[in-house]
Amino acid sequence: MIIEPTIRYYPETDTMAIEVRPWPAEGKGDPSQIGGEDAGEDLVIHYGPDGTPWLWEIEHASMHPEHIAAALDDLRRRSAQAA
């Protein structure tokens, strides 16, 4: 299975959202209404209904290349596992 990531950047708020996996097919609820957990300075990780990370939300993204690199590394790892 190939993961087709969704990466969005909102320049007006300098926020980046990186989906590290698709929303689970069996998942209930609206992903946009799912809360997240603070995971570092300006970093919120959102989880799917199965408790596994789904999306990394990076506030002030231009100031946090380390968060972007970590999210992309997580995405790369998940893609390799799915292959």
Image (tube, grey):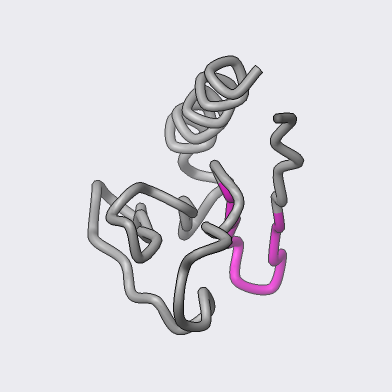
Does 14 appear in magenta?
yes
Say above or below: 28 vs 75.
Answer: below
In this view, the residue in front, 59 or 50, is: 50
Where does the magenta region start and end? Answer: 8-19
SS assignment for the magenta stretch, majority: strand
Tell me the quarter of the image containing the C terminus: top right
**Of residues 50 and 42, the one drawn nearer to the viewer in this rendering:** 50
Magenta segment includes 33: no
Q: Give coordinates of residue 11: x percent, y percent.
A: 71, 64
- Whether 29 is drawn above or below 45: the answer is below
81 vs 12, left or right, is: left
| Picture coordinates of residue 60, whole percent (x, y) | 49, 56
Q: Which residue is drawn at 33% across and 75% down?
A: 35
Q: Is residue 22 left or right of residue 28?
A: right
- Say which quarter of the image contains residue 46: bottom left
Q: Horizontal and vertical percent for residue 70?
A: 45, 28
- Numbered label tally: 0
Along the viewing direction, whichever of 25 and 62 lies nearer the viewer: 25
Which residue is at the front of the view, 82 or 4?
Answer: 82
Relative vertical location of residue 50 with respect to residue 66 in this rendering, above or below: below
45 left or right of 57 in image = left
Q: Is residue 36 above or below residue 65?
A: below
User: Which quadrant would the N terminus be assigned to in this image?
Assistant: top right
Q: What residue is shown at x 35% (from left), y 52% (from top)? A: 43
Percent coordinates x, y for residue 9 in the rendering: 70, 58
Q: Residue at x 47, y 28 (%)?
A: 74
Residue displayed at 23% across by 58% down? 38
